[in-house]
Amino acid sequence: GERLRVILHNDTMMTHPMHLHGMWSEQETPDGEFQARRHTISVQPAQRVSFLVNADALGRWAWHCHLLYHMDAGMFREVVVA
């Protein structure tokens, strides 16, 4: 599968624990060095985070904020790995 770098920038006043189903996220430091392997990446207000993902799990996967009212407000997407 393809290896992707995902960059998230939180421009809200709330923390967003972002969860990608089916694949591990390898969180990086601001310098691009490996920090930790995670299922959920917490993005603080005004924070920018980057992580690497090996898109090797074929299928349709959920990607969402773990706060239910944020999911209801639209922070829920489908990721397709083909």
Image (spheres, rainbow, N blue to C red):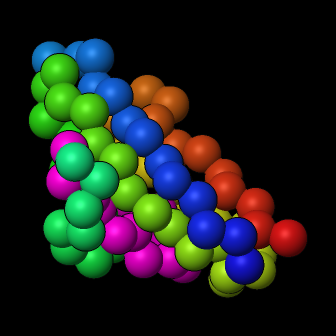
Q: Residue at x 14, y 26 (%)?
A: 45
- Name the quadrant of the C terminus: bottom right
Prevailing secondary structure of the magenta residues? strand
Q: Is residue 7 above or below residue 66?
A: above
The quadrant where residue 14 appears: top left
Position in image of residue 66 (x %, y %): 30, 53
Does the magenta segment cover residue 63? no
Could one spot residue 72 in this view of the protein? no
- 70 left or right of 36 in image: right
Residue 34, image x, y percentages? 25, 69
Residue drawn 20% across the image and 44% down it: 30
Rendered location of residue 19, percent (x, y): 38, 60
Residue at image position (42%, 40%) is 7
Q: Is residue 23 magenta?
A: yes
User: Residue shown at 72%/78% (left/top)?
Assistant: 1
Q: In the rendered image of this protein, does residue 42 appear above or below residue 56?
A: above
Would residue 68 appear left or right of 75 to someone viewing this image?
left
Magenta segment range?
16-30
